[in-house]
Structures are given as structure tokens and as C-alpha cells.
Image (tube, rainbow, N blue to C red):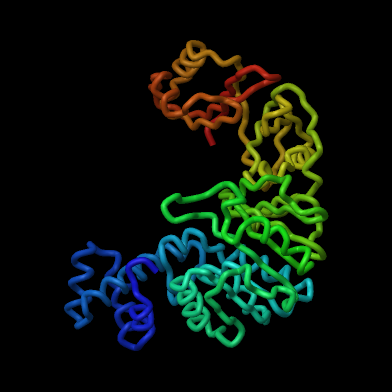
Amino acid sequence: MPGVTPELLALLQTPEGMAALAVAAEVGDGEPLAAASALRARGFGAELAAAALTQASLRRRAAVKFGPDATRMFFTRHGLEQATRAVVADRRAARLAASGARTLADLGCGLGSDALAAARLGIQVYAVEADPDTAALAAANARAAGLADLITVTCADATSVEVERFDAVFADPARRQAGRGRVFDPKSYSPPWDFVAGLAARVPRTVLKLAPGIDHALLPPGAEGEWVSVGGDLVEAAFWCGPLARAQRRATLVGLGELTGSGRERAPVGPVGAWFYDPDPAVVRSHLIAEFAATVGGHLADPDIAYVYTDDPVDTPFARRLAVTDVLPFSLKRLRALLRDRGVGTLEIRKRGSALVPDQLRKDLRLAGPNAAGLVLTKVDGAPAALLTAHS
């Protein structure tokens, strides 16, 4: 845990440490130097005060992912960025429990979000983390949640685990490397992709948490590929293997709905309609555009662009809908004149299939006026086009 020793983590869990955390939570919103001075004035040493303030800051940020539970958990900045949102972990745990899994090997447990969710449903979790400081945090979070009797945290290489001893396996391979940041090639994951991809052959109930941009071709035979979004943010992909698979492709909008299909269908193509739909990124990444278009009776205006159109408005949780007011072949001069005539000074720009840079385009358009509008930069039947939409 960068900047905090295991000894200091242990101190944060003592009565003195918990008192420092309580004070940090009260004053941490203020100016940093003043907050540090306030803790030292209460008799806390500089090192403990700094650690408590760091945790208080991370706990405030973590509330978005973990809700009230964040107030008693321990974090690092990197660990918080990578941690599964509680609402997603809870859904995954429920699906594992419903499958009959009673024991789970959690490979690459990080701060323990998925382990905590599984344990809350009575699943016995063997959590493995290669980084010793992160493993210590995961163990601390298990204790803080009162789940230490159901979660065993071990600092070890995931490839050394005898996974066949467990009913199910969950693997979240590390997708960052020291000095390199985020990595996109699965061959650079830790543990390596060959090991991760081979887990399903060893334990039928295997689920893999992966980057949303994962190549569909890597989906194991017979597995389900799920892409998950929360509040419009695409947060992860998950490969569900063996008896856990229930569809070929799934787009899950947490709290809103799910869309399933083969991911290989092609949507019909037609003219731009009166209504424009920008599908949720989970729908796009899962390749379920055709399935979505069918739910609204819509079509594409270009076979390679994932925007959907209808003549009549249809309510849907799977896309943002806007009214189309104008359609024109892209021309900076014509677009500038149209926006000037409409008195548009505020422009929300979407693009797909266009190389234009929105910020530069705004400057080139020389916007002025009291009105707002939306602009879609796209293609219609292979040609660059601009769609003006009513401001949402």
C-alpha cells in the first residue's frame, strides 16, 4: 500500500487508529494543512494523521462504489480504481450462489469487493492476492465487515492455487503494470491469459472479470459474454463459463434491464428517422445493436455505425433518444450557417464514424446565440453526415 506500511495499517485498526479515522472523517473536507494540524492537535502523530486523512479521502470517493460500507473499509487509490462496484459484485455473487456454489476461489481479489459480496451470501471464499500490501487490505476489509470467518485471504501467485478444490472460480487478472499503466493485451495480464482462459476446463463454474474492450474472439466456447454498465458508464466485461452461461451475449444496465442475443445479428438499414437513439455502451460493446433495434422497431442509417433511428418515439432504457431536426451532408460552411440561423451558442456533440475533434469543431463553428442544440457527427449510407437534434 503506497505510503503506508503494514505496521501503520495495523495501527489504523487499533482504538487509537480508529479514533484518528473518526476525526479525519470530520475534518478531512477542509484545507489539507488545516486538517492535518487538527489531527496533530488531538495528539495523533504526523504519520498516523496523514494515513487517517488519506483513508478518509479515499472513503469519501469510495462511497460511489460501496455506499455506506466505504466508511469502514481500507483503500489505496489504485485499488479503489480497480475495485468492483458493490452493486455489480452483489449481482455476481447472487448468480454464483444460485448456481449452487458454496466455495469460491477468488483469484486476484484486490481489496476484496467480490469476496465480500460472495461471503455475505454464505459462500466460503479463498481469496488470493499477489501483492502483500493489497492482501493485507483485503483481510482488513473482511474483518471490518465481520466476514473473516468466511473469507481466507492469502498472499500468493494465483497460478499456484489448486482450484479444483472449489465449487467455483472467479478471476480478475491485473490489467496494470508498474511503470506502464493500463495494459490492453490479454497476454500481458497477471496472471497470464493462458492460465486465466484455462480455468473453465478445470472448474466448470468459472467467471472472469475483464476489461470492457476484450476481444469477443477470446470468449471460451459455450461461454456467455456479459458487458455491464452502471449509470451509463461501462464498467466491466464478464465471461460466464460452463453451467453459469445463460445466453451468448448479454448487455446489463444495472437497475434498468438486460438485453440478450447472439451478438451476430445484423440490423436493417434505412433512412435517418425522426428519432435518434444512442445505445448504452454495454449494448454497443456486446454487439447487440440489432437486438436493441428490434426492441424499438428501429434501423441503422449506416450498416457499420451503431446509431439507431425510428419514425416514432419509443421509450427504452437501453439508449438515449433525441429528436432529429435536420440532416445534412457534412459541410462546415453549411453547418455554421444553419447554427447561426438557429441562434445556437451551446452545442452538445456526439460522434461515431467521424474523425473530427469536437472541441476544435466548436471553435471552427464560431457558435453564438442564446439557444442550445445537439449535433451528431456520423455516416449515412457511407457518407459523412451531420444531424442536428433538439437539446435534451
Does 181 sit left or right of 185 as displayed? left
Where in the figure is residue 23, as x and y percent of width and height? 29, 77
Q: Is residue 348 above or below residue 319?
A: above
Task: Using the image as rendered, state which of residue 355 and residue 283 is in the foreground.
Answer: 355
- Residue at 72%, 77% in the rendered image: 166
Task: Using the image as rendered, state which of residue 372 and residue 290 is in the foreground.
Answer: 290
Task: Using the image as rendered, state which of residue 89 and residue 280 is in the foreground.
Answer: 89
Task: Using the image as rendered, state which of residue 366 and residue 92 is in the foreground.
Answer: 92
Quadrant of the snapshot with the C terminus: top right
Where in the figure is residue 363, as x and y percent of width and height? 39, 22
Q: Is residue 211 above or below residue 383?
A: below
Where in the figure is residue 81, as x and y percent of width and height? 47, 59
Does 259 sit left or right of 1 as displayed? right
Give the quarter of the image for residue 329: top right
- Residue at 49%, 77% in the rendered image: 141
Where in the figure is residue 389, as x and y percent of width and height? 57, 28
Does 50 sit left or right of 68 as displayed? left
Quadrant of the snapshot with the N terminus: bottom left
